[in-house]
Image (cartoon, grey):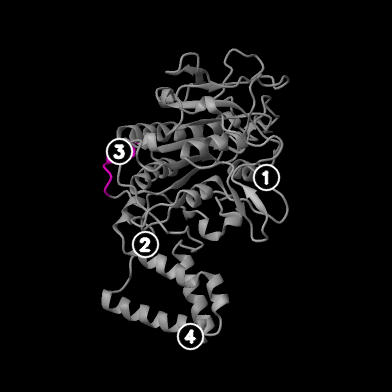
Amino acid sequence: MSIEITRRSILQSAAGMGLSFLMPAMNLRAAEDRGPKREKSLLVLWMSGGPSQLETWDPHPNSTTSHMEASAIDTVIPGLQIDSRLEQMAEMMGDLNVIRTLTSKEGDHERGSYFVKTGYRPIPKLVHPSITSIVTERKPATAKLKIPAHVSLSNGPFPARGGFLGDTLDAFRVYNPGGNLNNLRAPVNDKRQKRRLTSLDVVTRAFARGRKLVTDRTLHQLTVEQALQMMNTEQLKAFELDDVPDAEKKAYGDSKFGRGCLVARRLIETGVRAIEVILNGWDTHASNFEGCTTQITQLDPAFAALMSDLKKRDLLDSTVVLCIGEFGRTPNINPLGGRDHWPKWFPCVVGGGGFTRGQVIGETDPTGKNDSVDEIRVQDLYATVFKALGIDHTHEFQTDIGRPISVTDQGDPPAEPIDRLLV
């Protein structure tokens, strides 16, 4: 077997670990403090598929045209009602803000997800970084952190990417949150493991001889070093739930999303800088009401338990929490009993470190015929998120061809923070 084939097989084995090693950069620091002095993290709850605003954060229970089957429930914020199935979240809304009038021009899942994950509309020959990748680059964790600083929990079609900032800022993807990570423990004893690593080093150096530029681009050596560092740290336990009491697990709900939110909290405690937890299934072109019930049954306990734990553990003041999807759903019901794509306006929930609490921004027309009141652009929302995190939203990156690209879209008009949302 040739050296090249051996090297390729090693890389394939590494990819099989779930460590594809377009892993996040690990020039990292782990947080030790709690409270507002702790370095901030960003936690995105990504509602994949485009959740219906009428069945979540913007119901119109008294409208005869909104075609609702569920009722609305009062929350701890005076005058704010949300879907009645979000019963636990109704008690937690006082620590959050609701924006009901985000607006987008992208009504396709892929383009809409790209826009909402990056703050930029897609353009040819340039991939923008996700906001979680930007946070990881702008707010690097400390060297005490031995696990990735940018993590995506559960599977989704449009993962958070480093874009022009580089593949090392892609999210480390964990498809089954709370399950033991495969192949991260050496299957042999220490003595044999050392012999294997020595042999690997011989192969690596032989291949690299005369190919330095090529091997540097593959990130092979960095990949191996990061893998070994990760394999030998107790911080891996943050990804696992074996030591979590059953009552704590139960509070988050018996779902992949619930386990993802619980793992996310543990990762924040460990010092991870940016986390995405994905809840799939919001693409309700058919059977909208049944589909929303299924999703809300997972969202409500997990989101509420997450907020409660962050607050009790003195982590909320240092964690920006954002619950958002790529667009909303049409006010009208189609012949299949579903709602179609609706980027005209859609909601998000945001709060935590640096944000005020208990605000409701925007009003919408349940018929969809009239303009909404107080529309908010996605890029302005992200300028606000970055400012709360202590990141200059006007900072310019340089792409590989020397093109300057700002953290947030500085088009016409340029993105600006929503100051009324900030403390």
Q: Quadrant of residue 313?
A: top left
Asked whether residue 344 is drawn in magenta, I would say no
- Amino acid under disc 2: Met
Instruction: Find the distance from the CA under tag 1 to the CA under tag 2.
Output: 34 Å
First-in-chain label (4 vs 2): 4
Badge 2 element:
helix
| Residue 227 in picture, x, y percent from top left | 40, 66
Mark 4 is surrounded, within 10 Å at the Cα level, by few (under 14), some (14 to 19) or many (20 or more) other residues, namely few
Residue at point 57%, 76% (across, down):
213
List the residue tagged with mark 2.
230
First-in-chain label (3 vs 2): 2
Q: Are marks 3 and 2 in contact (CB under 8 Å)?
A: no
Badge 4 element:
helix
Mark 1 is surrounded, within 10 Å at the Cα level, by few (under 14), some (14 to 19) or many (20 or more) other residues, namely some
Give residue 111's mark: 1
First-in-chain label (1 vs 3): 1
Instruction: Find the distance from the CA under tag 1 to the CA under tag 3.
Output: 37 Å
Relative height, residue 283 to residue 220 (above, below): above
List the residue tagged with mark 4.
206
Q: Quadrant of the C terminus?
A: top left
Badge 3 element:
helix
Instruction: Find the distance from the CA under tag 4 to the CA under tag 1.
Output: 44 Å
Q: Is residue 56 visible?
A: no
Of the two numbered discs 4 and 1 in the rendering, the one whose residue sits closer to the viewer: 4
Q: Which residues are magenta?
A: 243-251
Q: Are marks 1 and 3 in contact (CB under 8 Å)?
A: no
